[in-house]
Amino acid sequence: MTVTASITDVARATGVSASTVSRALRGRPGVSVEVRARIVEAAAALGYTASRSASSLASGRTFSIGVIVPYVGRWFFGTVVDAAEHVFSAAGYDVLLYNLGSPDARKRFFTKLPVRKRVDAVLSLLVPDDDEADALRSLGVPLAAIVGEPRPGFTVVGIDDRAGAQSAVRHLVNLGHRRIGMISGDSGPQHWTAPVRRRQAYLDVLSDAGLAHDPALEADGGYTVEGGERAMTELLAASRPPTAVFAQSDEMAMGALRALRLHRLRVPDDVSIIGFDNHELADVIGLTTIAQPVAAQGAQAAGLLVRQLEHARLAPPAHVQLPIRLELRDTTAPPNPRRPQ
Amino acid sequence: MTVTASITDVARATGVSASTVSRALRGRPGVSVEVRARIVEAAAALGYTASRSASSLASGRTFSIGVIVPYVGRWFFGTVVDAAEHVFSAAGYDVLLYNLGSPDARKRFFTKLPVRKRVDAVLSLLVPDDDEADALRSLGVPLAAIVGEPRPGFTVVGIDDRAGAQSAVRHLVNLGHRRIGMISGDSGPQHWTAPVRRRQAYLDVLSDAGLAHDPALEADGGYTVEGGERAMTELLAASRPPTAVFAQSDEMAMGALRALRLHRLRVPDDVSIIGFDNHELADVIGLTTIAQPVAAQGAQAAGLLVRQLEHARLAPPAHVQLPIRLELRDTTAPPNPRRPQ
DNA sequence: CTGTTAGCGCCTTCAG
DNA sequence: CTGAAGGCGCTAACAG
């Protein structure tokens, strides 16, 4: 066990008081350049770092940010966390990561609230229900979220899900498709709002285009690759299968592509597929999709939180929307005239 | 700002001393069941949680684990972190995440060592150089690593890279290929050891099979999809291109598949590809690969760390190797007899 | 510009 | 079984 130097060791070595060491090392005014230099040198020689516990206790600030996320392992969340961490650490904050994918972990987190008194702010990548939002607000620290509706007390950074889904479906309509299916994600216990907004956009575009809505053309893919595959398989079993499908996420779209391959159907000749996200591999497999700036959302939200922490005066925006765009690739084309519509 | 209850508030509300509250809430012996029940109730009513800073300061334990990783956003690392976090949080530890992808962030981390006095243990997903390893050891806490060679002071959990790469290349040899290329990852400033071990295995198998090694059949893909694409393009430009390629990661293999598609070459008819990792999407695209248990490595390493923390007596193993296996899918086949060898 | 004095909130002896 | 006292290491007033 290595013995670590304390502030008094540095003080003693330099012949000054602990307060002066504290001031000097934190770059606070009121220390002569010469003394400061000596202190810095001594601290380095002793390998001194202030104990975070002690300074937190004394100052009331923790210099940590809590980041809560459903699954770090999934591309979208991993990418957001990655970007946010860069911003936080550059600003001198540590990141406390809480993975709340399972209902158990989630309940444990919100009842025990381990972040209480441990963080200066919280960034949420999940959509809290009302009780959970209250719990977070009770922390009394700045709050930001990447997904979900704007809500009091939170700075929400996101995209216009509705507009994104509309461009996706309109793209298919414009290509001439008339039987357009959708693979959606269940909002379920995660309280995602994206699925319902994207679905509404789908219904709206169909209706604007004068196309009837056929419930047999919708299937749930649970936001996973396998789910997307299952969902596509279901759609193909319809009495009149779709000629084009809007998958609410690229991962589900990839699953759909796999299902089509297994059914010996060609994309886009037989069936068109459009996804949502612009996953890092969407480009590799040539998937047409709605691109959203994922890392930028994390960086932006983190930046707003940091700004709020540094300048308490500045009221943060309640809602920031980042741009999306249609990324045309190889999985969409006009319907095949030789196949039944 | 919400006012948070302190231990004395609970003590006052229950009519006992703070010490008793502390003991009761931490489940330590020496408190009558009846008093304990009253304390627990009062604590819940007041929404009391012990301040981590204060308990750390007093007890010397932080109940936090530092996890250092090059890129949380990449599938491999995200998956490991995900699994490790579950184990840590279930055991009551918080996770402090440090993303050290950029040389800057990495240098800052190892010189300032923000984890000093902040964590009870460290899990490293990057391969430290000698100085960095020394810095970590100077922390005086249990250390574990997922990648890299076994080294003093660390519990290393990993796979047998050599055996994995050997099965990959042997598989190609057994199919009848004689011009076998490799897309490798540069070890570079990240100090990865996997690339060199996998390369050695490649050379060994070629040599065992009596195949000459042609440097024109090796290219660097930097462990990314785009890098893999570039590397494959290079290989195709050789005077005698390979009929099969071993990519040291699935992501590079996916890039290679893309390059082949752009060159109108069919897989596996014209060229066979085998990857390494069993990426979550390998199955989707039918990529033959060497599967390694990614989440299990994270969980295993985390578990060993927790065990060490709870039972200081138990010496942890220095090295644990998890099994790998060849996952046969659709991207490998015997060489095409109609194409020049 | 620098030192002194109090805590921050909790845990850990040591008494009773 | 329970309480009192002391201290973990640092920062924030307040004096000089």
Image (cartoon, coloured by chain):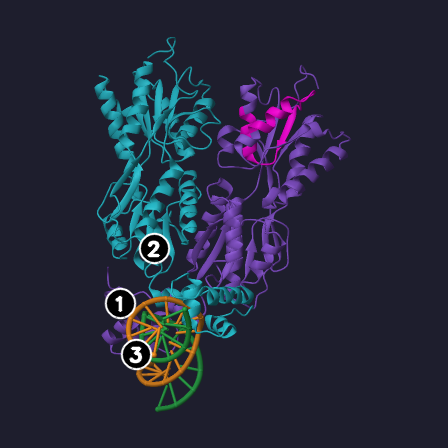
Chain colours: A cyan, B purple, C green, D orange
Q: Amino acid at mark 1?
A: Ala
Report the quarter where the N terminus of chain A lies.
bottom right
Query: Which range is magenta?
Result: B229-258
Q: Which residue in the structure is indicated by mark 3?
A: B17
Q: Front-most of B249 and B30?
A: B249
Q: Inspect the magenta stretch and tell me whether residue B301 lies in it.
A: no
Q: Which residue in the structure is indicated by mark 1?
A: B5
Q: Chain of mark 3?
A: B
Q: Position of residue B166 (x, y in %)?
A: 67, 38
Q: Inspect the magenta stretch and tell me whether residue B232 lies in it.
A: yes
Q: Is residue B58 visible?
A: no
Q: Residue furthest top?
A: A338
Q: Nearer the viewer's eye, disc 1 or disc 2?
A: 1
Residue B92 against residue A127 in the figure, above or below? below
Q: Chain of mark 2?
A: A
Is disc 3 surrounded by few (<14), some (14 to 19) or many (20+) residues within 10 Å?
A: some
Q: Amino acid at mark 2?
A: Phe
Report the quarter where the C terminus of chain A lies.
top left
The residue tagged with tag 3: helix, strand or loop?
Answer: loop
Q: Front-most of B26 and B72?
A: B72
On screen, residue A25 versus residue B181, left or right, reads left
On screen, residue A69 versus residue B283, left or right, reads left
On screen, residue A11 versus residue B200, left or right, reads left
Number of marks present in the image shown? 3
Q: Which residue in the structure is indicated by mark 2?
A: A109
